[in-house]
Amino acid sequence: MKSAMDGLIVLDLSQVYQGPYCGMLMAYQGAKVIKMEALTGEVIRQRIEDKNPHEFLMFNSNKLGISLNLKSSEGAEILKSLVQQADVLIENFTPGVMDRLGVGYNTLKEINPRLIYGSATGFGLNGPYSDFPGMDLTVQAISGVMASTGYEGKPPVKAGPAVCDILGGIHLYGGIATALYEREKSGVGQHVEVSMHDATYPALASPLAGYYEGEGKRPERTGNRHSGLRMAPYNVYQTKDGYVAIICVTEKHWEQLTRLMERTDLIGAPGYENTVNRALNMDVVDQIIEDWTKDKSKWDLMKQLKEARVPSSPVLSIAEVEDDEHLKARGMIQYVDHPIRGRSKVPGSPIRLSRTEQQKVTPAPLVGEHTEQVLQDMLHYSPGELERLREEGII
Amino acid sequence: MKSAMDGLIVLDLSQVYQGPYCGMLMAYQGAKVIKMEALTGEVIRQRIEDKNPHEFLMFNSNKLGISLNLKSSEGAEILKSLVQQADVLIENFTPGVMDRLGVGYNTLKEINPRLIYGSATGFGLNGPYSDFPGMDLTVQAISGVMASTGYEGKPPVKAGPAVCDILGGIHLYGGIATALYEREKSGVGQHVEVSMHDATYPALASPLAGYYEGEGKRPERTGNRHSGLRMAPYNVYQTKDGYVAIICVTEKHWEQLTRLMERTDLIGAPGYENTVNRALNMDVVDQIIEDWTKDKSKWDLMKQLKEARVPSSPVLSIAEVEDDEHLKARGMIQYVDHPIRGRSKVPGSPIRLSRTEQQKVTPAPLVGEHTEQVLQDMLHYSPGELERLREEGII
């Protein structure tokens, strides 16, 4: 059985999360992904002394790793030679860096008109913020993620996960896959550009809708409550061993919940007739529910609520998530044996295709682990030439 | 100039955010996307009486809208006839619903082996949580988004944006585009499956890395501070008109910041020598910075910090985001004139391709707005047959 991206060659020059996640998903679909790093390794490796922090392992599975000094003219020439054979290049340098290195899109498309060149940025290649520093924290700040997270009257809060990085990376994947499809028709590549800031904006739909419908008069952050404060129950409730999230989208959900709570007296009672009235009365509604949840366990509550067909979920801790049985059964938690870090958990691919094969997960490369192999196989460098390149600090 | 997905026909049966976002991005790339709804309209329309809430407009631009009663056998037959001509079908019903309607993947692939059938779910088609209710709130609860958001010793907090919905939708887009590319080689479609829960897990990389490296002993949520509490400065600071996010990734950033604050005495001082030591001392470091930021404006601070090359960003309010000049310049904020809601702001596409054309944005359809047009054009129904279908409650 073949993989969907079998035969594709991807040069992945990207760093940290956003670009590397995109490259890894392509590797999982069968592309040959060559991660190209500076001789000292990419930025995220510098977080720990052995250069293989867990964050690096999580986004670089199934890649070949080569190290190359792009600031040397011979290094840039080696990149250009690889580009002749490549289908895709991914980079997330600050806008302008690739051009200054002499390997920007306009140069590389002359070398290989079929090249699909993917640029992941913080704020894009144009527009008033295009030179703003694009990191997950700064994009969360400027995009409204922080404004809409936390509680009314308290400071804005960042979302714990790196949502802007991953939204950026997966939109880039989508753009590159689209360009690959289109290239089958036209025979020509193109420049795919995705910014983290753009990629985050659609996720703001609920806070934006709350803003529009409240004519700007509603609080911009509502804790664990509905963004528009227009639904109740919709919250996270204390239990004896943590928290449980409960939402009643339909009246049926609410009726079923009142049955479980043995509070059927509330069905149709004044202030409880529908979600709009309950929302006006949400402090009381939430208190009634928490009085019921607080001495029960979160998984018992979930089980009861599920049987009664009321949407709910336990709030899992990071310790529970990192060992989640469902994520393991789904193959989202994968194990690799890394030569330095040992047995480590890394993410699988959320993209499942029924007919084409997904690659077995292999560990992220060490710095320059496959430099010689790749330069010999693809560019036919001799051992002597490789030795010279190494002595001259080019590889 | 052609669009990347010109000529593709997409049947979009999906609802709320996750599937509709995927369909809209395909429409922006030139696919003919036919949104199929129940006669009363999809779930999210029910939020307001006129059936055109802003959330609906935001994720259904550029689609044709048809209404069809899939529970009637003739309705299901009409879907099957459309499938014969379609390239892609998108659905996000509860697992099993499409099979019960007689239009599951195994049936439809017999009708059209080239069909790419995209299923967006909460928790996937298999695994112990596969029958759990999958809404943005419940997926945030179980996936660790909540556990990692908020402050140590305080309750978990949901991220304000619908991050799980949008992560699910864009991974589905990536999977469908991959299958379209592969179909050009094999001539055959396949079933693409993406769950919101799977799609959220990679974004947990920082909290997971913090957990692994702290051997589970660090707090699982750290407010606006670094997930692993291993970097300082890294926080959001009060200003006279809101907040500003500041991070020092390198020592150079820190030195530049001390210059701006006129506190160069801190460079190399005990407890401030490097990010690890500053992190151990982060309450003091943060206080020094906030004493400097609190009487300045957030944009003035950003400007100074940017000139000094220290990564920072103002925290924008939702009111500022919804009118953001950069998002407008980038085309991420688009205007449509909707027949009921009037002039409205909707998202553009974060996926930019340099050579193929992106469609001009047009407003989301009303319920059944294009039913007759589509059934006439694609299936050649006569006016009399359409009248009968309408009378019988099939369209």
Image (cartoon, coloured by chain):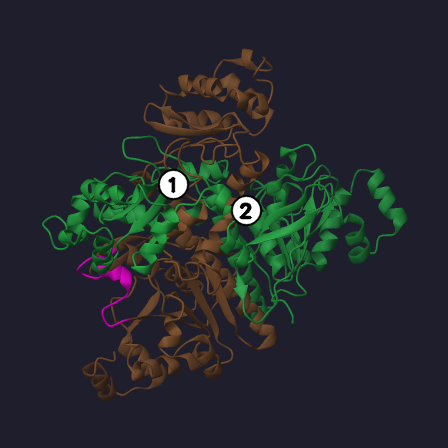
Chain colours: A brown, B green
Of callouts 2 and 1, the N-terminal one: 2
Where on the picture, by quarter, is residue B6? bottom right
Secondary element type, mark 2: helix
Residue in front for this viewpoint, A300 or A218: A218
Give the overall secondary structure of the magenta segment.
loop
Label number found at residue B242 = 1
Residue A374 % position (x, y): 32, 78
* Residue farthest toward the top in the current orientation of the protein: A265
Residue pictured at 57% horizontal, 24% vertical: A275
Question: In terms of depth relative to the viewer, which is nearer, B231 or B145?
Answer: B231
**What chain is tagged by disc 2?**
B
The residue closer to the viewer here, B140 or B160, is: B160
Judge the density around disc 1: few (<14), some (14-19), many (≥20) Cα neighbours within 10 Å: some
Q: Is residue B273 above or below residue A227?
A: below
- Bounds of the magenta span? A38-53
The location of residue A159, given as percent across then percent down, is 38, 43
Query: The residue marked by circle 1 belongs to what chain?
Result: B
